[in-house]
Amino acid sequence: MVLVLGIESTAHTFGVGIATDDGAILANVNDTYTPPPGKGIHPREAAEHHVRVAPRLIEKALSTARVSLRDVDAVAFSQGPGLGPALRVGATVARALSVKFGKPLVPVHHGIAHVEIAKLVTELKDPLVVLISGGHTMVLAYSDGRYRVFGETLDITIGNCLDMFARELGFDMPGVPKIEELARKGRRYIPLPYTVIGQDLSYSGLLTRALQLVREGYPVEDVALSLVETAYYMLAEVTERALVSTGKRELLVTGGVARSKRLREIFNVVAEDYEVSLGFVTDELAGDNGAMIAFTGALAYRCGVTIPVEESYVRQRWRIDEVDVPWVEKILRGEIRFKFRKMY
Ligand code: AMP
Ligand code: MG
């Protein structure tokens, strides 16, 4: 068994988690930077936030887990993708701990961490994955050593699309739940650009048109309803085809937007129609968090994945299908086993 401390800092959240490769989460402490209403995340301000909270969060994670840095086997960090200045804070902290305590440094891909933590809590083994976080809108499936992409956005993510719409209407972040609440009061569906190209999705034209309708005086509730329904159905369509072409019998939805109530309803219908088992990441582990980096770091470290400090630069545009995930094969073969235990 290995014990790993993991650091998340790709965007708005600085997080510290402590986890083992057999599924125990010993600590998960996170602090999210909230931009002023109507504003997006400014990378430098997010980074300054992370610098401010980092020492306190590391101490809190260690005291919650009742371990010291001497007890951990490795230090993992979110190497990318994300906002450069924010990523560099997490990487710098991880390098410092690695050098000072003589612990190996483990690079973790943020998107893969969203997937692994969701597999842990749902106990799904080999699912088709719908990854919908602030930075990703992708349909993925494991094959031959990597997660392969079976559809993705060609421009902005589904979360960005709804967050930017929310911001233009003056709501503060997170935007998705606010737009969904507004959408529930909508009464009429207004046709909007539904852009599915092969297995890929485009959300920017949808956002532009929705904002135009608001300016033209259409009721915001109706526009919100139309936007949410269009955005989610586009994703459901691509997911259905990916289920057919991959033949996967499980469907997993993870990332910050996986908390969406309406999206859950739609994916419940998809799972029923295609007779696949459906799992959603839990709300607590849906958004960016340190626990997912620690757990994925523990799986990676068990397979010997480490990086020398001098090569540990951050990767702002790191694609998920460029990353080898040797632990997945071992999990499928039963050589790595785990059970989710929340220990804090
Ligand atoms: P992440 O980058 O994984 O933390 O995900 C951030 C995204 O999750 C943003 O687009 C948020 O608007 C969205 N989000 C946050 N809370 C919720 C919620 N309760 N329901 C749906 N989406 C949410
Ligand atoms: Mg994320």
Image: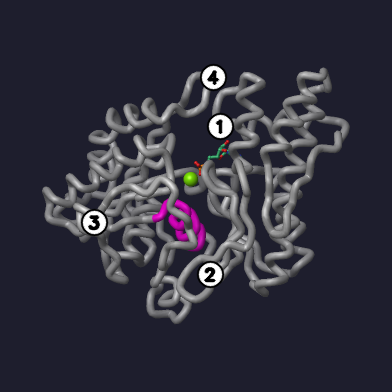
Q: Are marks 2 and 4 in contact (CB under 8 Å)?
A: no
Query: Residue 105 shows which numbered tag?
Result: 3
For residue 174, the mark is 1
Is the CB of mark 1 within 8 Å of ligand 1?
A: yes
Which quadrant of the figure shows ligand 1? top right
Q: Which mark is residue 37?
A: 4
Three-letter residue code for mark 1: Pro
CA separation in Å, label 2 and label 3: 25 Å
Which of these two is toward me, 87 or 29?
87
Q: CA distance from mark 2 to mark 4?
A: 39 Å
Residue 305 in the image, given as x and y percentages of width and height: 29, 66
Would residue 270 be counted in the magenta stretch?
no
Q: CA distance from mark 4 to mark 1?
A: 10 Å
Establish if 333 lies above or below 94. Answer: below
- Left or right placement of residue 4 versus residue 291 in this view: left
Distance from Cα at disc 3 to Cα at disc 1: 32 Å
The residue that label 2 is drawn on is: 142
Which label sits in the foreground, 3 or 1? 3
Residue range (magenta): 109-119
Q: Amino acid at mark 2?
A: Tyr
